[in-house]
Image (spheres, helix red, strand yellow):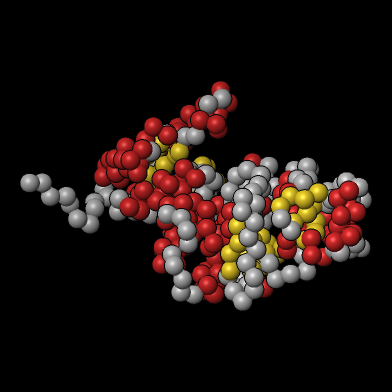
Amino acid sequence: MPATGRRRAGLLAQELTRRDLEHSVANGLMRRVAHGIYTGTGLPGAAEFLGAAEFLGGSEVSAHHALLQGLTEDSDRVISFDTAAVLWGLLPGEPGPPFHVTSPRDGPRVERPGLVLGHRIEVPEQFIVTRGGVRLTHPAWTWLDLALNRPLEQALILGDRAVRRPRHEYGEFGEPLATLSELRRAVVVRGRTKGIRAAREALELIRVGSDSPQETRLRYYMHLAGLPEPRVNPLISHPSGYPWFEPDLAVEKFKVSIQYEGEDFHSSPGSVRKDVRRSEITEELGWIEVRITQDHMADQGRLAIARIERALLQRGWRPLRLPTHS
């Protein structure tokens, strides 16, 4: 039996002799989870590895991570796609089957129906990270794996999330999962492949600072409608130079502030008072505030775009091409 704690935590069956394997199963030290794959969560030291909960700041260690360790350690395989995205927090939830595993192009594909979904892609070492004994794709490469297989809007939302800086005022600390330069490098290294053109288009639209998928969607809908590109969370200062307010989106040339009012963050009495005061400050500085809710976001934000467009027109903006009427 392997000696290190990590190898006790998760093993492939071929790493044990059949006799040792049968003995471990018979004594409850290992259990079969699929053909050729066993976990050893009952072994001494099995909880020494780190799981998804610790990637996300929690404390519970999932038994699934024994399997992820066994699938990747001492091999060229990496956890990838949706499984890696969940581990990094790009996608919500906890990791669960089918687990995505990428092998080199010239290596055998790992497939276990219902449990492991195999891929064969060359992942450069610069885009492989080891966390708690689990080899997985770097957040930039993980984003690209997803972007190649999702609509542009979803690729953009995931990209904004990948480069988002933790905000201290929300009790968040640390560094972004990835930088824009790392996303660009991943796209260049990946080269010509199916979906790369849409991934490049999404990459050009990714901006640092978006705090929610709805803010990203709103910015994307403005792009589709041909409206001026807004800045994301800019700090607007009083003429005296004192920082005064920070809108979700802002078209500074026309002094139009855009706030997405999510119900989770703007329904408490304290939040309502703060929003009212923010609106007063916005008006005092000569800005127009446009408040957008979920009700405005249907049909690619048709109502939201109409509200923003009215504010821009009021401030002197004109579209490049005026609509023609028959």
Residue 189: percent from left, percent from top? 54, 75
Q: Is residue 17 visible?
A: yes
The percent position of residue 262, horizontal first and vertical second, equals 49, 34
134 relative position to 111: left or right: right
Residue at image point 79% right, 60% down: 13
Residue 86 versus residue 287 in the image, above or below: below
Residue 260, quarter of picture = top left
Residue in the picture at 77% in, 46% down: 63
Can residue 80 be seen at all in this image of the molecule? no
Residue drawn at point x = 60 percent, y = 44 percent: 92
- Quarter containing the N terminus: bottom right
Quadrant in which residue 3 is drawn: bottom right
x and y, in percent, of residue 192 in the image: 46, 74
Percent coordinates x, y for residue 159 in the rendering = 52, 56
Q: What residue occupies the far top of the structure in this picture?
A: 269
Q: Residue furthest bottom?
A: 106
Residue 306 is drawn in which quadrant? Answer: top left
For the residue pair 303 and 191, the one nearer the viewer reads as: 191
Name the one closer to the observer, 93 or 19. Answer: 19
Q: How many marks?
A: 0
Left or right: 313 as drawn, with respect to 12: left
Residue at the spot x=54%, y=46% of the render?
211
